[in-house]
Amino acid sequence: MRKASILLILLILLTTVAQAQQAEMADRMRSNGKIYVVVLVLATIFAGIILYLVLLDRKISKIENNRKS
C-alpha cells in the first residue's frame, strides 16, 4: 500500500511538470504563429484517417453483401 501511494504521488508530480512545459511550448508556438501549422497538419491527418475508415467500411460491406448472395 505504501509503494502504491509513493508511486501515485510521483505520477501526479510528473504530470504537473509535463503540463507546465506543454503550456509554455503552446504559448511560444502561438506567439510565433506556428500553432496554426500544427493544427492544420493534425486536421489533415485526422481527415485522412476518417476517409480511410469510411472507404474501408464500404469495401467490407460490399464484400459481406457479395458473400451472402
Image (cartoon, rainbow, N blue to C red):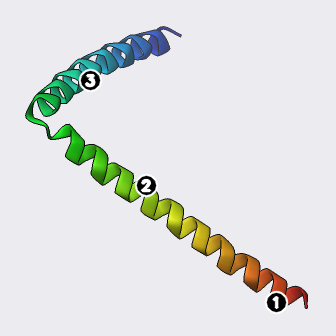
Crowding at label 3, few (<14), some or many (≥20) Cα neighbours within 10 Å?
A: few
Q: Is residue 55 above or below residue 39?
A: below
In this picture, residue 14 sits left or right of residue 65 = left
How far apart are the two marked residues, 1 and 3, measured between alpha carbons? 51 Å
- First in residue order: circle 1 vs circle 3: 3
Q: Position of residue 49 (x, y in %)?
A: 47, 62
Residue farthest along the left direction in this orientation? 32
How far apart are the two marked residues, 3 and 2, measured between alpha carbons? 24 Å
What amino acid is labelled 1 in the image? Asn
Q: Nearer the viewer, mark 1 or mark 3?
A: 1
- Label 2 secondary element: helix
What amino acid is labelled 3 in the image? Ala
Kindly identify the residue that appears in the image at 16 percent across and 22 percent down.
24
**On residue 66, which mark appears?**
1
Kindly identify the residue that appears in the image at 52 percent across and 60 percent down.
50
Q: Position of residue 61 (x, y in %)?
A: 75, 76
- Label 3 secondary element: helix
Q: Please report contact status of discs 3 and 2: CB closer than 8 Å, yes or no.
A: no
**On residue 18, which mark appears?**
3
Kindly identify the residue that appears in the image at 20 percent across and 23 percent down.
21
- Label 1 secondary element: helix
- First in residue order: circle 3 vs circle 2: 3
Residue situated in front as seen by the camera: 3 or 21: 21
**On residue 46, which mark appears?**
2
Q: Position of residue 15 (x, y in %)?
A: 33, 20
In this picture, residue 5 sits left or right of residue 13 = right
- First in residue order: circle 2 vs circle 1: 2
What amino acid is labelled 2 in the image? Phe
Q: Position of residue 53 (x, y in %)?
A: 57, 66
